Amino acid sequence: MTSPITNDFDPEGPRPRAPVQRVMLHAPETEWTYSHHPSLMFFRGRFYAMWSSGRRDEDAPGQRVLITTAERFDDWAPPAPLVGPLRGKHSELVLTAGGFHEHAGTLVAYFGQYEYTPEAIDDNGERKLDGDRGHQDTLLRAMTTEDGDAWSDPRSMGVRIVPNHPPQPTTSGRLILSGNISFPYSDVPTGLSGWTETGVYPPAMADGIVDDSESFWEVQRQAGWDVPVCEGSFYQTDDGVLHMLLRTNTERLAVTESTDDGTTWSPPVLTEFTDNATKFHFGRLPDGRFYYVGCPDPEPRWTRCPLVLSLSKDGVRFDTHYVLADEDYQKRREGRAKGGNYGYPHTMLHEGHLYVIVSRRKEAVEVLRTPLDAL
């Protein structure tokens, strides 16, 4: 069984380019040379960006969260740690940037955290290169600010998830976190409490469900799926249905859907939407069209290039495509899993522009914007 959702993307076809302005926010050369999981927000007259920052390797102990701000798109402050490194029970924690949410003059910054078990790290406290295994104490935490400068101490959100994107509201106002196999929801508009677990995991796993980069593999095994699903992003069509697209590490995305405002979700099925085994972000333009930003050219796998904006009038067929960027970035320092030219985009609409923040080979962080009236 497959879903009719398609992007009609032709890797050999014409590729019109959208007009784009670009700013490199961070390009480390000597230390803390891993950067990934970026997210963007506008609050009280300033742009805010956050991302995960590691000394060298992906998701290694000691990973922290950096933040930077700008009053103008082309003039960003030097990034500084928002939180971390933090010490866990026996090693440094892995902190993963989870994005922002704003309500009633308060900005919330989320991050996921976990620690590796003693068996998963070596004598130097470094992650062993034997797969994404050995996580413990996964938790979502949040910090708040009212002025954008002074931040509260981290607090627990009560859910064991490292989210793929920050909370996104449905038309009812319900907030949903897009995870890998779980999609917690809250009807508390602050996004600071009331989170209820739900997702596509087998019911037998519900009591102890954890959602991070290890657990979705176990969900695949227990559910008996042919492919894993992870790193979701959703949009809502006018019939009220929520469509959560999911990465599968194949050439196509999967989808799970909810007809009850995210309370329950259907079993995931494959779509005809092509993908380069990477994260992506969906949204809706002010004129009603749905959009996708990601890397839909499936080959060569893991190159994550070009970065493409795809548009749809009905949320089923994404048939208009613009190249946002396809220039190569040469990484400066080696590190575990540092690949992919345009990694893990997150988007934002603001004052007539679509903004996109991406990591560049999991080392640098760049922001792009294109005017909506050019689409």
Image: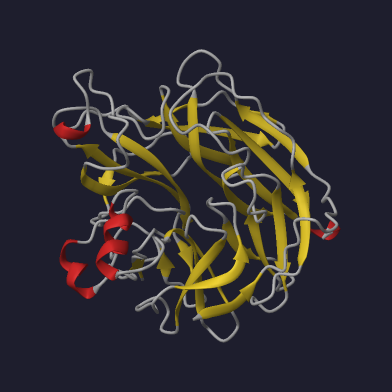
In the rendered view of the protein, which quadrant contains the C terminus?
bottom right
Q: Residue at x 35, y 78 (%)?
A: 263
Judged from this view, the residue extending furthest toward the bottom is: 239
From the top left corner, tell me how far across and down residue 201 is, in percent: 29, 69
Instruction: Classify residue 55 as left or right of residue 29.
Output: left
Name the residue nearer the viewer: 161 or 302: 302
Q: How many marks?
A: 0
Instruction: Classify residue 113 as left or right of residue 257.
Output: left
Whether residue 42 is visible, yes or no, is no
Instruction: Classify residue 184 as left or right of residue 367.
Output: left
Q: Residue at x 44, y 30 (%)?
A: 53
Colour option used: secondary structure
The part of the image, by quadrant, that contains residue 93 is: top left
From the top left corner, tell me how far across and down residue 336 is, in percent: 43, 29
From the top left corner, tell me how far across and down residue 68 is, in percent: 54, 32
Is 136 above or below relative to 104? above
Whether residue 32 is visible, yes or no, is yes
Q: Residue at x 31, y 27 (%)?
A: 62
Judged from this view, the residue extending furthest toward the top is: 30
Name the residue nearer the viewer: 29 or 101: 29
Q: Residue at x 50, y 31 (%)?
A: 338
From the top left corner, tell me how far across and down residue 349 is, in percent: 66, 56
The part of the image, by quadrant, that contains residue 128 is: top left
Instruction: Classify residue 138 as left or right of residue 50.
Output: left
